[in-house]
Every structure is written in C-alpha cells, then in structure tokens.
Image: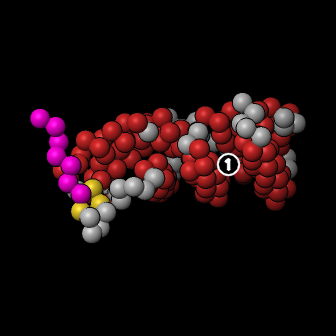
Amino acid sequence: MGWICLYDRRMGLFSPGNDDEVVTQIAAHQAEILAYIQSLLPGDASVKDVLQRTNLVLWKKRGSYERGTKFLSWAFSVAYWEVRAFLKERKRKGWLVVDDELAKKVSTTMGEVAEEDGSMYELKGALELCLQQLAPKELDLINQRYYDDASIEELSQVTGRPLGSLRVSLYRIRASLKRCIDAKISMGGGV
C-alpha cells in the first residue's frame, strides 16, 4: 500500500506522511544538487560526502519544505549551509578552504540559473566555453587557484607577483567569466 499524503492547509507544509514525494524530489534532483556542491567545492574529493550530508538534512527537514515552492531552490539553500558547515569544520582542522567570496558568487549564480530554467548543464557548458577564451596566463592562474587549491600566498610565491596584484587579477578574471557566462546563457546557452 502506498504512502498517505497528509498536508497541513494552514501552513502549506508536508507532513511526515508524505515521505514518498520528498524522496522522489530528492532523487530527481541529485544531479543538480551534486553539480551545485561541486561548484562550491571544485576538485574536492569530499563532494559526495557533502551530498550525503545534504540528503540527510533534506530528509530530516522535509517537514519544513513548503509544497508548491521550488524544491531545487530549497535544496540548494540546504546544500549551501551544509557546504559552509563542512568548510568550517575543515578550517577548524586546519585544512585548505575555498575562498568564501567565490563560494557566495558561485552559489548565487548557480541558484539564479537553476531558478530560471533548471539547467546546470547549460551553465557548465557556458563556463567551459568561456574558460577556453581566457588568455593562457589567465587560465593558468584560475587553474592554480581554484582547481589546484593554491592559496593566494602560494600563488604570490610561485609567480613572484604581489598579493594585491593577484587579488585584482583574479577578481577581473572572475568578472570576465561571469559576463561571458551571462552572455552565453542569454544567447541560448552557447553549448
């Protein structure tokens, strides 16, 4: 016999009796949630662990999901806070942590794109095209900083450039990538 769907009309919340619908939503959006977490933890081997933590919290908080709202936005919000908790725990243990400002920007961009059309693959494709348009030195800097997890201080030592100069360069490259991605997406993906 199937689950009985109970819905509190006053609050618009799922009750614990509607577990199958929440499980269906979680399962249907695993790829998007995984891509979102990967965007916040690029190249990190712990992505799947954070995904599992996120799934667990989504399950525990299923009663707070408001029926009729965008499930993916709610799931991204939960994932964002799980990534933050993971990074805080990692930082407390002295592990290398992704730049908080970048995480917020990626989070905002991914959330906006997901709300517009739900296409994480379109964003990824646009990002790949835009990365190909970078000058070799810019691409090398991005790869070292975000994919190899080099700190600004390490980059300064390797490149011989001052910290302020590197920060400005990374800011300009990220801004350029954002403009490029926005343009590609507005033109229909460019993928």
Task: Report whether 43 appears left or right of 150.
Answer: left
Q: Which residue is pictured at 21% across the width and 49% down the height?
A: 5
**Can residue 56 be seen in this snapshot?**
no
Task: Report whether 151 appears left or right of 111.
Answer: right
Colour pattern of the rendering = secondary structure
Instruction: Estimate the x, y position of residue 58 in percent, counting from the top left.
Output: 34, 50
Q: Which residue is pictured at 65% across the width and 39% down the height?
A: 123
Figure quadrant of residue 119: top right
Instruction: Estimate the x, y position of residue 1 in percent, counting from the top left.
Output: 11, 35
Instruction: Estimate the x, y position of residue 178 in percent, counting from the top left.
Output: 75, 49
Q: Which residue is mark 1?
A: 151
Q: Is residue 184 magenta?
A: no
> Most extreme residue toward the front, as rendered?
9
Quick one: 45 or 26, which is closer to the camera?
Answer: 26
Q: Is residue 188 above or below residue 93?
A: above
- Report the magenta residues as a range: 1-7
Q: How many marks?
A: 1
Quick one: 89 or 74, which is closer to the camera?
Answer: 74
Quick one: 147 or 52, which is closer to the camera?
Answer: 52
Query: What kind of residue is marked 1?
Result: Ser
